[in-house]
Every structure is written in C-alpha cells, then in structure tokens.
Amino acid sequence: MNIRRMLTAGVGAAAVLGPAAYLLFFRSRCLNWGARADEVAAKLPGDELLADAGLVTTRAITIDAPAGAIWPWLAQMGSGRGGAYSYDWIENMLGLNMHSAAEILPEYQDIKAGDELPLGGGGPVMRVEVADPPRALAVRSTDKNWVWMFALLPEGESTRLISRNRIAVKALSPVSRLFYLLFMEPGSLVMERKMLLGIKQRTEHGEYDSDE
C-alpha cells in the first residue's frame, strides 16, 4: 500500500470513527454537562414551546446564592445589553455584538413576556415567552426553531441554575445535521459552560475577572 492509499484510508477511518466515538462516549456528557439525571428529565417552563425538538441540551451549575441574586444577571442578557458572559471575542466574530457586563445593569431589569431581544445585526431575534422572576426565563426565536430556557431551583442556601436549549433540526439536510453533530454541539458546550461559570462568578463574588 503506497503512502497516498494509506493517507486516504486513515482519513476515511477517522471520518467514520470520530463521529462514532463522539456518539458513543462523549455526546451525552456534552449535551448534559453539569446536569443531573432528574434535571435532564424534568419539565421546564418553555418546553411546550417546541415539543418536537430534534436536539435538546440541558446544562446546569450550582451557585452559592439565592435565586433572587442570580435573576438580575439573566434578565439583562442579550446583544447590546448585558451580553452572554461567555467568550465575547468568539461571539463578536459572528457579528453578535456581545459585551459581557461585569455589573448589574438597572436599565435592563424590567424584562417581560413579549419583549424582543436581537442577537446582533444579522442574528436571530429572540422573543421573551416566559418571564417569572426569580424562577424561570424562556425565549424563542421568531422563526420558532429555537427555544432557550433558564430555571432557578433552590437547593438549601444555594441554587441550581439550569440552562436548556431546544432546537428543531428535522428540516436540516444530512450535511447540516452532521455539522450540528460534530461542530455545533461541542461548540455550544464550550460557550455555555463559560456562560454558566461566568454567571456563577458574578453572582458569588459580585465581580468578574476578565483574565480567567
């Protein structure tokens, strides 16, 4: 077997084994980072907005603070508002105009059902469907293909912050589905994990270390 055939065989094997390994060993942890089994199975306010979702992620974190201290950070999220507490430089490469706030912004606290929150100039517009402070927040894209929910569940003196995404993928082509599987799912974990940790740090310490 010459070098070209060996390389071709290696690339082909990687193309098959890579997705298979992700599906078998990593996907569940990727989609449900930090969430317990009962939280993954739980019904959250907003689930009914996209009942037939092809992709569902449930990620969670414990924050050593009451729900009322966490809610303001959720209420002000959005492009041109408080940002998303994740990697701004990545989001801004996509034109999302995210600048994560290090403090609570009073002007963005009055969030209510019906409000529309654009994600950058070319991004989707998210409509607030559920605003139940300090328990639940759910937004849905105006094309109705994406629902993003937050639930705050008291646990002693701490709070479990649960973030769930429901996304319609059935209409996507096989190539687009593969792209979602191999790139969007792991990418969403990177961004959402950073967001949850960012909210935790801001809430618990009242400040944010931009060098973290």
Image: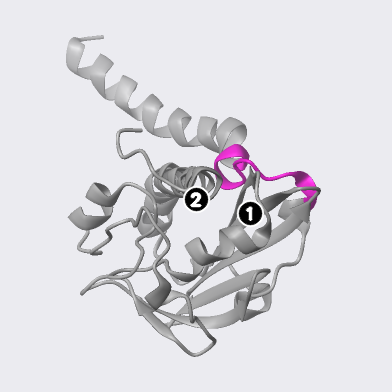
Q: Nearer the viewer, mark 1 or mark 2?
A: 2
Is residue 72 something one can see in this rendering? yes
Residue located at (67% from left, 78% from top): 48
**Rendering coords of residue 187 (x, y %):** 39, 45
Q: Secondary structure at mark 2?
A: helix
Q: Which residue appears at 47% of the width and 37% of the height?
A: 19
Instruction: Kindly identify the amino acid type of the residue bearing the numbered disc 2.
Output: Ile
**Left or right of 88 in this view: 130:** right
Q: Is residue 212 left or right of residue 136?
A: left
Judging by the rendered image, the residue that carries numbered circle 1 is: 161
Of 6 and 105, which appears nearest the observer?
A: 105
Pick the quarter of the image with the C terminus.
top left
Crowding around mark 2 (Cα neighbors within 10 Å: few <14, some 14 to 19, many 20+) is: many
Say whether residue 170 is left or right of residue 182. right
Quadrant of the rendered image containing residue 174: bottom left
Residue in front for this viewpoint, 191 or 210:
210
Q: Amino acid at mark 1?
A: Leu
Residue displayed at 45% across by 49% down? 195
Display colour scheme = one colour
Q: Are marks 1 and 2 in contact (CB under 8 Å)?
A: yes
Q: Which residue is mark 2?
A: 199
Report the magenta residues as a range.
Answer: 28-38
Residue 164 makes an appearance in the image: no
Q: Quadrant of the N terminus?
A: top left
3 in relation to 175, above or below: above
What distance separates the C-alpha of mark 1 from that of mark 2? Answer: 9 Å
